[in-house]
Amino acid sequence: MRHSLAFALCFAAAPALADVNAVIDTHILPGEAAFASATQDLASAAADNCLPDALPPAWNNAFDAWMGISHLRMGPQEQATLSMAYWPDDRSSGRRTLARLIADEDTMGTDAEAFTEVSAAARGLYALETMLYDPQFNDYAAGSYSCTLVTVMAQDLANQAEAVNAAWNQKFAPELRNAGATDNGVYLSPQEAERALFTQLHGGIEFIADQRLGRPMGTLDHPRPQRAETWRANRSMRNVTLSLEALHQMATALAGQPLEAVDQAFDTAKYFAGTIADPAFQDITDPQARLRLESLQGRVRTIGDVLIVDIGETMGIAPGFNSADGD
């Protein structure tokens, strides 16, 4: 259980400072298209060569693209995130499901359509990380069941990403643009659309602080380095950096202009990110390494505070803590 910042909505006298169209046109739609393209490249690469020494570049490119949109838990991505990027997986259910599929040579792992029935934890980017980087899974040979499974997993991910991309373009982006229209049953006013986007923005910052940084930190007496995101792929810090860059872009688009305090908060976090020595956070048991990660976490939380003051309050959003929210 964690304390996370929820939003108590109230009307404010100040006019809203928000550009919904800019977020859609410069952030959401390009980001979704980039992810769909990168996952299709991954699927094509897997079809050509599904071996674990060949696929990491394409997988990393797809993961980079995911960092540009991973904070968007709305619209078609709200549910799809579970099967495209199931993390955290505290019970290792993804690894267990993959192990069972391989041991049984289950036919669901040989057909992309059938694979949609597999547990979400065994699908998507993180399951592919297991197949490509985990020594218990990545010793497979060409022509093996595991090699076929990886090809199917990559195609399944590409299919999902393209479906989400199409849904954004055909349905959900128009709903955001036309908030308040008489036939819009999702966003009953422009303010609802603005606040929905701000919630995604601020939630992305919280996710970095609480999950990407907080999980491997654990407690002072009990750090948990192997709870770091994509630590086997050695890219935990890269995820933080890319996500911060994407959120900075979204904040600027939503504000309709660069805001000095927001820019400074992101730049400060970027500076502290540069002090992290281990890109996988596996040195967290060292007191100095932990201190650097704690310092970065504090700067990321500061971004959230600044976003509320400089963007959120102009929309009538005031911060409030909700102890019942979060995991």
Image (cartoon, rainbow, N blue to C red):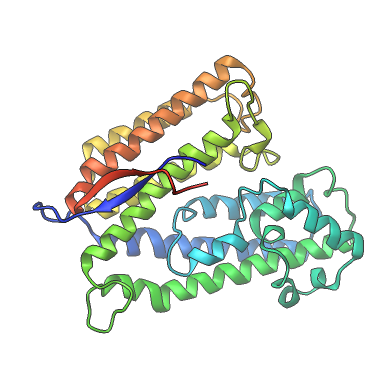
In which quadrant of the rendered view does residue 20 lie?
Answer: bottom left
The one nearer the camera, 123 or 154, is 123
Q: Is residue 158 visible?
A: yes
Farthest residue, direction left: 13
The one nearer the camera, 273 or 57, is 273
Using residue 217 as the reference point, say whether residue 22 is left or right of it.
left
Using residue 153 as the reference point, say whether residue 238 is left or right of it.
left
x and y percent of residue 251 in the render?
31, 49
Q: Is residue 237 above or below residue 245?
A: above
x and y percent of residue 318 in the render?
24, 46
Q: Residue at x 44, y 24 (%)?
A: 295
In which quadrant of the rendered view does residue 245 lie?
Answer: top left
Q: Residue at x 22, y 74 (%)?
A: 180
x and y percent of residue 80 in the render?
55, 66
Using residue 93 as the reference point, say whether residue 84 is left or right of it.
left
x and y percent of residue 213 in the render?
53, 35
Q: Is residue 143 visible?
A: no
Farthest residue, direction front: 324
Q: Residue at x 59, y 30 (%)?
A: 218
Q: Is residue 152 above or below residue 63?
A: below
